[in-house]
Amino acid sequence: MWVKKGVVTEKAPVINASDFETYKIDLSRIQNLNFKERSALSRSLLVRHLDLGSSNAEEAELLALSNPIYDITRFGIDFTASPRHADVLTVSGPVTRHLKVAMERTYAAMPYPKIVVALGDGACNGSIYKNTYACLGRVDQFLPVDVYIPGDPPTPEEIIKGLLLCKIILVKK
Amino acid sequence: MKTLIKNDVELFFESLKGAFKGHLLELKIISPNHLHLVIEKDYLTIILEYISGHTELKSSLVTMTVTDERHLNGNFKLYTVFSFFLPSDTNVLVTFEIALGKENPTYPALSQRLPSADWYEREIHDLFGIIPQGIELDPLVLHRDWPRGKHFPMRRDFLLDKQIPISEVSHEFSQPHGDGMYQIAVGPIHAGIIEPGHLRFCVIGEEIYKFDAQLFYTHKGIEKMAEGKSIEDVLNLAEHICGMCAYAHSNAFCLAIETLGNIEVPKRSIFIRTICLELERISSHMADLMAITSSGGFGFGASHASRLREMIMRLIHNLTGHRFLRGLNTIGGLKKNISDDLFQILFTELEKFKNQFQEWEKLILNTDSLLDRLESTGFISLKMADSLGLVGPSARGSGIDKDVRRDFPYLAYKDYAFKVPVYEDGDALTRTQVRIDEVYNSLKLIKKLVEDLPSGDIVSVVPKQFPAYEHRLGIVESAKGELVHSIMLDTESKIFRFHVRSASYMNWRGMAQATMGEDNLKNIVPDGPLVNKSFNLCYACVDR
């Protein structure tokens, strides 16, 4: 029976130094980053996700991270129910008018150091969504963003890499 | 056989004309089964009497759209589309067009007697400032802090990038108060990874007495963004309305444009599009089934369902290069060809998937603890589901035999028959069973389509110029149900009006009703998430 097949989980993605250039656009907030400090990766990381008006593709990929194939909890990364327990705030989608207040309150409720990850093209640069009466634009106009994970939506592998980078940033911050 | 069908449709036209007597201004035949009637504004409600007098026609409201044509003919125009099922298995769409005038546009509301029109009319009031007379007009799309009666964002004279400052007014729910009654507020930011929406349970003890929701948090104004853009740009935008139904949106838009321009899609593209639509359906249903088993407290089943879903996602990625099927379609066909070898891989991989899915199905349908949670939870009766206009698996779980793929066939569904699963109990279990059956049907259909896959061109010639200011529909069955795109182009073949009515838009009110339950089949608070997941609606589709 296939249920007893064994481990289906795949290997962790390898992080190269070049990944910092892909994901980290704003380096000014982190000084003296030493990539070789692998001990940072052994720490746990709690993530609060915030949908600010994405198409739900980013959410579907985040849900996929919990399946047995990616199994994100083996890295010590987990999703929390409250921003008060979160090290990282991942946001997706361009900021909508109706969610601006909720976004500000969630950010204010987080403990320091607040790490913000822009997930997907909508959050990183506004994607194809133009500014309208209800759509206010990309996320870094409202919150300081530390890591950008571009993609339409980013694949689960890319999201795992981005979150592992957050662990290194967390130590340095 | 053909003459009989024609007579049937003709008879129906005659009786419809008779109902409107002298108030019918114009009659156009768009296609053999799509009528377009222009009628006088104050007589739209005649259609309601016609429907209640002809219940055997099983008519239902398909969509309601307003266009701002003041620069053309000095009018706002309302397009209301109904579907009718004629006795000889012919199905007809009828569009009713009324002109509403320029200043203070009003018309007699439909939702007094047609509950499924409620959300449409509130949306029309919010975005266009048109007043359907005779109903209460609570804000729907724009939240309470939007200044009432001053700014109407979908009118053409409201500039694209104009923004209104946000004020501190919050939404007030009209909830009952009394001894032992309390309220549970949930959202807009939820505990899990789901989309934003504010839910309000009014509870006595543990039993849910009333349920209400404030949605449209992710409203981006996609319909406003689309105005003035080229057709290809809006196709891209349509794919980004929702991730779970991305390919269904893409196809609905292409279908609308292709009907407008009389474009014939090459045979190979038709087959590939259909295969991909079915793959998206399986992927979406697996996500739903995962959510149901996980909300039902059966983590083992949920874990394996999510593994099976990842299998399908990877097959889609392997086949098309994108996990959500974006960027595959173009008007008149496909952007790129997919080689036959990839379909052979798909064929063998789906066999493996089917074997594992069978075992999974056996597992969950034999787990008493899960069945106990699903049975009689979130009950919605046939009568209620019909009056709220439910669509898709949620409707089929309540005994409504409705499926666009069979009733208004498009693409390869015209030539391939399949069984539509219908269950009558109307609870979370039947909605789960409908999804399981549909996964099997989709697998069967994909198998047949891959076997018969023709070779040849993938894209046909697309005209540069399309007819201007013609209202056209693209209706497809997305995984969540009937999805309707209405489009209208201007003289330069740019988008003039783009309106999306998703399946979740119709099912949301059904979900709210099912949460409240009926008669003695009430739900308790822990059932809330399970009822929600048994419908598993997209917020992004609703909010746009």
Image: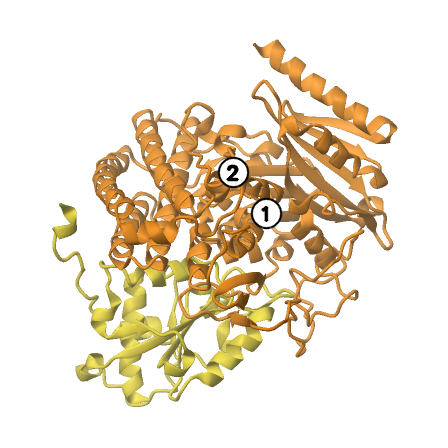
At 34% from the left and 44% from the top, the residue drawn is B320
Whole-angstrom CA distance, mark 1 to mark 2, is 11 Å
In the picture of the structure, the residue carrying the numbered disc 2 is B476
Can I make out residue B323 in this image? Answer: no
- Numbered circle sitting on residue B231: none
Query: Subunit of mark 1?
Result: B
Q: Residue at x 62, y 11 (%)?
A: B4
Residue A140, above or below B276: below
Residue B70 x/y as whole percent: 81, 49
Earlier along the polypeptide chain: callout 1 or callout 2?
A: 2
* Residue appearing at x 43%, y 63% in the figure: B194
Above/below status of B273 relative to B156: above
Q: Colour of chain A?
A: yellow
Query: Chain B appears in which tint?
Result: orange
The residue pinned by badge 1 equals B501
**Secondary structure under badge 2?**
strand
Mark 2: amino acid: Val
